[in-house]
Image (cartoon, rainbow, N blue to C red):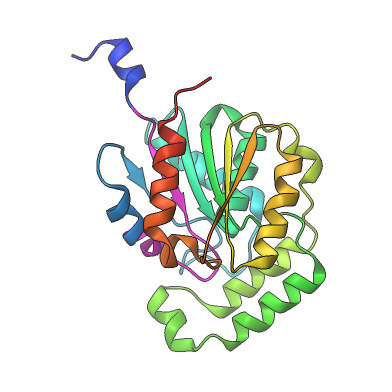
């Protein structure tokens, strides 16, 4: 039987929260690049599952992730999230801080501008239906997420987040870089890393680079 000290020394589980227009399978290349040594899971978030009613609530999605961790007996985990997955991870850090160790976030949708939401809606409508089906997502469900984010403003609550945060943005994603810079000013314990030549879909287009950054960040000893 492992001792309590051995159990405490084990790395925390890593929870991967996918982005808008993605399904959990989007993490496949990241998982391969990250390698073994840490238990990982990539759950569907409540309101994004194919059989869920169309509609999305950020708090409900965060609560669903927390419920799943508790059912698994996980007391604390690290999180990597992109897009809406990053927003859900941040919501967890605000509402259930005891469950959150460290956060790696790409493109968190916190107080997105009306213009940014409008452009994302236009982009979602242009995605071929076949591509959405292959990814296991639906257009109405994605548009419902953008509608839910219209009234979301978590900037004040973000100041209460004590977990270490690594914000990652691709240099080609100009809006994402600006948003990450603004977010870094709201979070007490955050730093920003810009990936040269990368776009917004970090977990698929830049899986190896994101995995390397995540490894380095999570393996740094606690202060």
Task: Please name whichever residue, 194 or 150, is drawn nearer the observer in this view of the structure.
Answer: 194
Image coordinates of residue 129 in percent, x first then y, are 48, 87
Would residue 20 be counted in the magenta stretch? yes
Magenta segment, which residues? 11-28
Is residue 43 visible in this depiction of the protein? Answer: no
Residue at (50% x, 55% y) in the render: 45
Would residue 83 be counted in the magenta stretch? no
Residue at (75% x, 50% y) in the render: 182
Task: Please name whichever residue, 18 or 211, is drawn nearer the observer in this view of the structure.
Answer: 211
Q: Is residue 41 above or below residue 190?
A: below
Is residue 138 visible in this depiction of the protein? Answer: yes
How many numbered marks does the figure carry? 0
Q: Is residue 91 above or below residue 128?
A: above
Q: Is residue 8 above or below residue 104?
A: above
Q: Is residue 158 left or right of residue 210?
A: right
Q: Most extreme residue toward the left, as rendered?
A: 1
């Amino acid at each position: 039987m492992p001792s309590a000290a051995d159990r405490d020394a084990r790395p925390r589980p890593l929870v991967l929260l996918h982005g808008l227009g993605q399904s959990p399978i989007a993490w496949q290349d990241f998982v391969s690049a990250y390698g073994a040594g840490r238990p990982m899971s990539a759950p569907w978030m409540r309101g994004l599952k194919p059989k869920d009613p169309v509609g999305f609530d950020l708090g409900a999605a965060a609560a669903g992730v927390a419920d799943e961790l508790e059912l698994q007996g996980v007391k604390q985990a690290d999180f990597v999230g992109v897009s809406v997955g990053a927003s859900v991870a941040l919501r967890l850090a605000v509402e259930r801080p005891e469950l959150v160790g460290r956060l790696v976030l790409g493109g968190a949708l916190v107080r997105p501008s009306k213009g940014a939401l409008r452009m994302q809606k236009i982009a979602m409508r242009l995605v071929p239906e076949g591509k959405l089906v292959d990814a296991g997502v639906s257009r109405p469900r994605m548009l419902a997420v953008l509608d839910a984010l219209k009234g979301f403003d978590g900037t004040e609550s973000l100041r209460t987040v004590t977990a270490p945060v690594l914000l990652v943005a691709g240099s080609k994603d100009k809006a994402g870089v600006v948003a990450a810079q603004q977010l870094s000013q709201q979070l007490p314990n955050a730093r920003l890393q810009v990936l040269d030549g990368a776009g917004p879909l970090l977990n698929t287009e830049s899986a190896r680079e994101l995995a390397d950054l995540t490894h380095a960040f999570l393996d740094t000893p606690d202060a």
